[in-house]
Amino acid sequence: MLEESESPCHYRRALEVVSSKWTVLVFYELEFGKKRYSDLKKRIEGVTQKMLTQTLRQLERDGLVVRYVYPTVPPTVEYELTPLGETLIEPMRVLHRWTDAHYDSVLKARSVFDQDNSSP
């Protein structure tokens, strides 16, 4: 049951922060420390430069990631989770464990649903 100070709106806002697949993948990459932008780009398969930049900016805006710019030519840019961002690591690990344990069941349920709802 929701406490008086909580509302579905709070959960909706929290989901807005972490629901992007790119956000989750950035978190997995930053979990063990600071990473250069170029390393993130290489390690996150399928992310475009534009989407990675947007994701990192949003995470920085939300106070979950800090950006460091070093005066080199060209500038070196690194990202790191903030203490607030680090508080999301364990909930993301729980979701990862749930996915490992149950995703086959999800796929099976989808298959049954699709078979039951396919046109003759």
Image: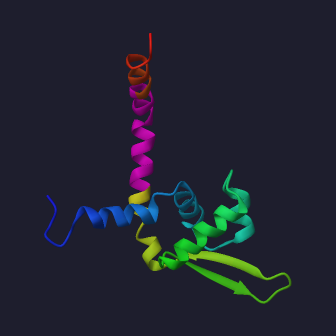
Side (left or right) of 96 relative to 71:
left
Q: Hey, which residue is sitting farthest bottom in the picture?
A: 71
Please state the total of marks drawn on the protein image.
Answer: 0
Which quadrant of the view contains residue 108? top left
Q: Is residue 73 above or below residue 49?
A: below
Which quadrant of the view contains residue 69? bottom right
Side (left or right) of 79 relative to 106:
right
The image quadrant where one finds the N terminus is: bottom left
Q: What's drawn in magenta, residue-wise?
A: 93-109
Q: Position of residue 47 (x, y in %)?
A: 67, 56
Q: Is residue 114 above or below residue 51?
A: above
Q: Hey, which residue is sitting farthest front in the picture?
A: 119
Residue depicted at x 45% and y 79%: 83
Residue depicted at x 54% and y 72%: 58
Q: Is residue 74 above or below residue 101?
A: below
Viewer-side residue, 36 vs 115: 115
Side (left or right) of 47 relative to 62:
right
64 in the magenta segment: no
Q: Position of residue 15 (x, y in %)?
A: 39, 61
